[in-house]
Image (tube, rainbow, N blue to C red):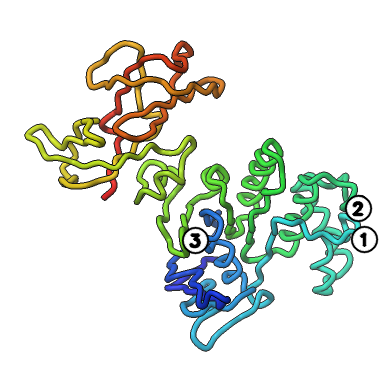
């Protein structure tokens, strides 16, 4: 089921007056795609998910499922008519029912025959590895097991669209990783169009076929995970995507016979030769992995003093001041310590420019 969203707006009224939560969002979700809505708290991503689910009505704009209008001028179809299933951050399991009873609940409400219920519940349980838990109560399960039960309850209905609202936020880091892998594998097996909301860019990068980045109710960029990382559209996306985040200094480009000189804080950082650039004020960004740090002078390298050195296992995360801004760099040189003098070279081909 493909989903089309056109000029979607949502406004709420509070003691502060009218609040625009979504302001003209346009999206196209392809059939069978794992689509991620990513952004900081308050950006409107959960509201957008609720609108897609039919839990709320948009102020204006249009939502189509496979060409059929689900919300628009004079038209609105609720969740039941959209055949969607939703997995929430809170597991929302019935404590008095067994795992089998929880998973089977939507089928019983739909008056599905008992033999079919048994078959579909057992199949969903096998896919999510919870077959041994079918006789247990939710209170006897770990957080990861409860979330898998909630996912099984959603997929057992065979929905056209599967929606996830930050489902892994309550799990610890190791369990989030394991559940993430299982969730991606499950979605591939089912082939269900899935939309996943998160504020965690690692989740977005690892799960999404494509990722929509939201801020302040507006779409900032829509691309593949690597497209967002390698070609951020603006300063916000550049620093929101990637860990450690991109370094960013406010400076300018000056045209020279050799190319464009990128400078910040009175320091010439690099010479750029991209003909698409233009002279003038600009933000100059570079990933920590794209800065070469050495103890000895090197062509194009600038002298710096290491303010901190944080071991990350294979790499060391170095911090230093450069061109009036704080920069971070990743290096494998374990001998670079806090307080040491070093030289940093920004790889020109890896520099991003934001106007």
Residue at the outermost bottom position: 74
* Left/right of residue 298 with respect to residue 11 in the rendered view: left
The image shows residue 111 at horizontal and vertical percentages of 84, 74
Q: Which residue is mark 3?
A: 30
Instruction: For marks 3 and 1, give the one nearer the viewer.
Output: 1
Q: CA distance from mark 3 to mark 2?
A: 37 Å
Q: Which residue is mark 1?
A: 96
Task: Give the position of the N terminus as an image quadrant.
Answer: bottom right
| Occupied quadrant, residue 293 | top left
Q: Could you tell me which secondary element the residue under label 2 belongs to?
A: loop
Residue at figure coordinates x 33%, y 21% from the top left: 304
The image shows residue 309 at horizontal and vertical percentages of 49, 21
Q: Is residue 211 above or below residue 116?
A: above
Q: Which residue is mark 2?
A: 137
Q: CA distance from mark 3 to mark 1?
A: 39 Å
Residues packed near mark 1 inside 10 Å, few (<14), some (14 to 19) or many (20 plus)? few
Q: Earlier in the sequence, mark 1 or mark 2?
A: 1
Residue at figure coordinates x 43%, y 27% from the top left: 319
Q: Is residue 28 above or below residue 293?
A: below
Q: Are marks 3 and 1 in contact (CB under 8 Å)?
A: no
The image shows residue 224 at horizontal and vertical percentages of 44, 49
């Amino acid at each position: 089921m493909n989903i089309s969203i056109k000029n979607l707006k949502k406004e709420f009224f509070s003691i502060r007056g009218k609040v625009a939560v979504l302001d003209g969002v346009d999206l196209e979700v392809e059939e069978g795609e794992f689509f991620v809505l990513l952004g900081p708290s308050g950006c409107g991503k959960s509201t957008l998910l609720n609108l897609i689910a039919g839990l709320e009505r948009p102020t204006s704009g249009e939502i189509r499922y496979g060409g059929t209008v689900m919300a628009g001028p004079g038209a609105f179809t609720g969740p039941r008519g959209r055949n969607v299933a939703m997995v929430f951050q809170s597991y929302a399991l019935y404590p008095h029912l067994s795992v089998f009873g929880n998973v089977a609940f939507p089928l019983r409400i739909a008056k599905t025959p008992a033999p079919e219920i048994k078959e579909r519940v057992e199949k969903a349980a096998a896919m999510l590895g919870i077959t041994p838990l079918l006789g247990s109560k939710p209170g006897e399960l770990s957080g990861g097991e409860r979330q898998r039960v909630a996912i099984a309850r959603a997929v057992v209905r065979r929905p056209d669209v599967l929606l996830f609202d930050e489902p892994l936020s309550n799990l610890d880091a190791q369990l989030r990783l394991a559940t993430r892998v299982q969730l991606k594998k499950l979605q591939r097996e089912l082939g269900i169009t899935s939309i996943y909301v998160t504020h965690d860019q690692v989740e977005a990068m690892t799960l999404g076929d494509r990722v929509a980045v939201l801020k302040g109710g507006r779409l900032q960029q829509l691309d593949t995970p690597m497209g967002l990382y390698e070609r951020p559209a603006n300063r916000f996306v550049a620093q929101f995507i990637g860990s450690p985040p991109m370094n960013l200094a406010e400076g300018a480009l000056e045209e020279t016979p050799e190319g464009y000189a990128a400078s910040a804080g009175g320091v010439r950082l690099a010479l750029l030769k991209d003909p698409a650039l233009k002279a003038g004020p600009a933000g100059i960004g570079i990933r920590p992995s794209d800065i070469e740090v050495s103890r000895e002078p090197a062509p194009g390298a600038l002298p710096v003093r290491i303010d901190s050195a944080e071991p990350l296992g294979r790499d060391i995360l170095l911090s230093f001041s450069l061109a009036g801004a704080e920069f971070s760099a990743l290096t494998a040189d374990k001998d670079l310590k806090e307080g040491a003098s070093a030289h940093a070279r920004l790889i020109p081909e890896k520099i991003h420019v934001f106007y």
